[in-house]
Image (cartoon, rainbow, N blue to C red):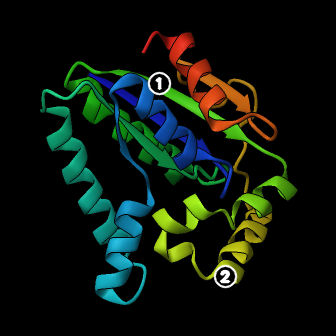
Amino acid sequence: MKLVIIIGGGASGKMTVGQELCKITGLRLFHNHMTIDLVTKVFGYYDSETISELRRTVFENFAKSDNYGLVFTYIWDFSSPRDGEYIRGVSKIFEDAGAEIYLIELVADFEERLRRNRTENRLANKPGKRDVDFSEALIYDEKSCRVESLPGETGFENYMRIDNTELPASEAARLIKERFGL
């Protein structure tokens, strides 16, 4: 079993690289908006507790499955200790089931992220991002937190940082697959 966690700021390409990685590896994709958009649609607002509970259920049951592995995407705010605890907790669920864990950090320049915020693939797969003005405001709000790690900060042995500002998602996926033998 493999768990590939792809982190990065909003519109850094996490889901798109994850989609491409799944195409060439047999991994399954569980991007963060699969739960965010579901809960928001049902509740009418963002409910973090329900989102976390749903994700935990998916993680626990997937880790027990016969699937090859999972790609999970997440915005890790490095200024928040809770986010680090969350990622380590997700990793532990899979480690306890004997999985190998890989952390991929995507970085892209701000202007490119704003451009990507409006792409057809993003809007098709993330209903909550269809209000592009609101979604763009969230990217601007990231300036009040830190969505890029400092050297050695993640603590993951199987770690890779990719600047994909000008790198196609398929190429980023190929680099990940080759680096970790997925």
Label 1 – label 2 distance at C-alpha: 31 Å
What residue did someone put label 2 on? 134
Looking at this view, name the residue that lies furthest to the bottom: 44
Name the kind of residue labelled 2 in the image. Answer: Phe
Q: Position of residue 64 (x, y in %)?
A: 12, 32
Q: Secondary structure at mark 2?
A: helix
At x 76% / y 56%, what residue is drawn?
113
Residue 105 locus on image (x, y percent): 63, 35
In this rendering, is residue 74 above or below 70?
A: below
* Residue identifier under label 1: 102
Label 2 neighbourhood size at 10 Å, few (<14), some (14-19), many (20+)?
A: few
Q: Quadrant of the N terminus?
A: top left
Q: Is residue 4 above or below residue 127?
A: above
Tell me what residue is drawn at x 22 percent, y 25 percent.
96
Mark nearer the N terminus (1 vs 2): 1
Closer-to-camera residue (117/42) = 117
Residue at point 62%, 19% (across, down) = 175
The secondary element bearing badge 1 is classed as strand
Going by the numbered disc 1, the residue's amino acid type is: Tyr
Q: Residues within 10 Å of mark 1 (few under 14, many from 20)?
A: many
Between label 1 and label 2, give the one nearer the viewer: 2
- Please state the horizontal and vertical placement of residue 108, each as a whole percent of the image: 78, 44
Instruction: Tell me the quadrant of the picture where the C terminus can be found.
Output: top left
**Residue at the front extreme, as displayed:** 120
Circles 1 and 2, Cβ within 8 Å, touching? The answer is: no
